[in-house]
Structures are given as C-alpha cells and as structure tokens.
Image (cartoon, grey):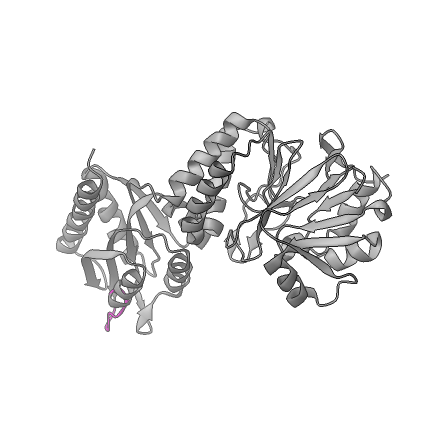
Amino acid sequence: MTLSAIPIAPDIYWVGAIDWAVRNFHGYTTHRGTTYNAYLIIDKKITLVDTVKKGFEHELLERIASVIDPSKIDYIISDHSEPDHSGTLREVVAAVKPEKVFASVVGQKTLARHFGDIGIPVTAVKDGYKLSLGKRTIAFMETRMLHWPDSMFSYLVEDQLLFSQDAFGMHLATAERFDDELSWDLLERMSSDYYANIITLYSPQVAKLLEKVAASGLSFKMVAPDHGPIWRDMARFGKMVENYGKWSARELVRKAVILYDTMWHATEEMARYIADGIVAGGVKAEVMPLGSSSRSDVASMMIDAAALVVGSPTLNNNVYPSLADALTYLRGLKFGTPVGAVFGSYGWSGEGTAQLKEYLASMNCAVIGEVKTQYVPDAGTLTACRDLGMQVAAKVKELLPE
C-alpha cells in the first residue's frame, strides 16, 4: 500500500506531506502542525510544483506513485526555495530525472547556494514568462520578498488555478485538503497567526502585490498555497484577500496588548491594575504573561493592536530574558504599533523599565507613561498602574475615534 494523491481538479493532484508533529517553525509556535504542499499536473509535460521538507520525500514520492511512475515527471517548478519546499529537491531530482527544473531568476541563485549541484541545471524564468505543458500553460509572476527574494506565483491559465507558494497559506495540519471542509473561524485564526508571524514585515510588498494581481485581470477558480488547505470557495478566498489588504494596511482596532513576565508576582499584580484601567477606559485589553504565552502568540495578538504595554522585573541589571526574546522577535516584524507604555518591579537597581523604553523606541512605539516600584507595589503604585491603563486607553481612543 502507498499513500494516495488527492485530486484537486481534472488531472491535477495534491501530493504533499502532512507534518502533524512540528511545533516550532524557526521561532514561530505551530500549535496545529503544518503541511508541505506539492502539486502534480498530468499533461504532455508532466509537472511537479514544489517539493517538501527533508525527511518527507518518501511521502511525496509515494503519493506521486499512486498516480504515475515518478520517473515520468518532465518538469519540476520551484516557486519558493525555502527548505520546507525545496529541502528534498536533490533527492526528488535523483529519483525522477526530469528534463528541467524551473525557478525564478533569484530562485536559481538561491537553490545553488542551498544545495550546490542538484544533478541538473536550474532554468530561470522571468516575470510574465509562459511555459507550455501541452494542453495547459503556466504563467509566472514574481512576488519578491513575499516572503523571500526568490518567491513567485505559478498560474495555470486554462484552469484558472494559482499556485501561490506561501501567500494565503497557514500552518495547519489536517486530514482535510480544502477550505470548505473547515470552519471559517479556524481558517481566519490560523491565517492571521501565519500573517502576523511570517508576512507582517513584508506588508508594503503585500499591498503592492494585491494591486499587481488586481491590475493583471487574472481570475481564480482555485488557489493552492504551499501550507494549509487549498482554497476552492472563492467567496471565502475573497474574504481572505480582504484580510490581507486590512493586515497589510495595518488597520488597527481599540486594543492594547499587555506583555509581561514576573519573578515574585509583583509585576504580575501591576499588569492586572493596568488592564483594569484600560478596560475602564473603553479599550479592549489582552493580557499576555510570557510564562504561558509564546512569542508567536504575542505576535498573533499584535496584528491589529493599537497599543503595547510591556512589563518586566529587573534581573541582573537587565530586563527579564523572556521579555528580551519576545521584544526582539516583535521588533523584527515591524508592527509599527503607535502607543506604548512600560512598567515593572525591581529590587535595588531598576534598569528594566528604561531598557523596555529603548526597545519600544526602536519599534517606533511612542511611550506615553511608565510606572515602576521597588519590590512590592503598594496602594499608591497600584493606583498609578490603573491610571496608566486609563491614559493608554485615552490615547488609543484619540488615535481611533469612532
């Protein structure tokens, strides 16, 4: 017995792999695993679109073998050279012995840097190039920095099917292959997590790409990303494109994220009073203790937050290590959150809050207030914390009037 390919359209199959176990994807916590999607097109020139992560090559080849002898594959297209989509390229080329491997101009160079000689020269295709498969034609569209310099779309013209590499995907391992087999709430939550942690940094390029696709006049009957389910309900996909437009434009809501860690619960108590002040001021508060929230959970919550309030004890003259980790991660994603505040407890030196302000300044987040206390917060400190929450809420409402 072999693993089976799944038909997604006439003579087109999903032949990817499901990674049920992965929980860390270069720093992004994948609570529900992921898929590495690859696609097989049966035509005069039998074509494989993308491969899979190293270690899953047998799953890929078994699924292909359930349809055809893998050695009959003529072309391999690499839409994205990140190793979760190209890590088995050398092994697949050795098994298949294709006529050609195609990648973008940058992808040709990136694959060479990753793998050296894969056993066959990689042919570069430029933006707008069209490749005949026989009855079908693939048109290529460069999508540089979405989210690597080599990234490109492959559009199957006659079927109006877009192979979108990482765009419109999500880290979600399921037995279901299509969006309409899953709830919209799940799809929206997982795709927003994915956008927040993978795509946010490239939001300006997303906005330009959405304009480029709209101007191209292309229409879609199906969109097949490299992670997660395949979109075949185009009304739902339209909602997802709207979300990408909203997320790329940084459309904010009246929400403040309170991010903190604590040693002996003093900073934790301060966070509670700040949250109470924010809520009393008419703004939603999301409290995220790093003892139970990963850095990627925080990034997911930050996707539409107007304020970031950060608290840390001082440890060895520094911010708490978990805060340095999370803030470095958020700084790299460049959310551009406009409103900030800091708080924390200390024993004898108290550098923690000053360093938090430096982090927020480097993130272009304007700090509007600070509360710090030695050891345990007294009633006056807790009142100041609640007042700080009220100030944050007032500033958010000023920036986002109803």
Tally the numbered discs.
Answer: 0
Q: Is residue 17 visible?
A: no
**Residue ranking furthest to the left:** 380
In front: 77, or 240?
Answer: 77
Res. 333 visible in picture: yes
In the rendered structure, does residue 234 fall within the stretch colored magenta?
Answer: no
The quarter of the picture where the C terminus appears is top left
Q: Is residue 388 left or right of residue 229?
A: left
Measuring from the top left, give residue 126's x and y in whole percent.
61, 53
Q: Is the magenta stretch mostly helix, strand or loop?
A: loop
User: Which picture quadrant has residue 115?
Assistant: bottom right
Residue 352 lies in the magenta-colored region: yes
Expressed as whole percent of the image width and height from the top left, the position of residue 63 reads 78, 41
Q: Is residue 100 left or right of residue 79?
A: right
Horizontal side of 116 relative to 384 (left or right) equals: right
Choose top left, top right, bottom left or bottom right for residue 376. Answer: bottom left
Q: Which residue is drawn at 48% across and 34% down?
A: 240
Magenta residue span = 347-353
Q: Is residue 218 left or right of residue 205?
A: right
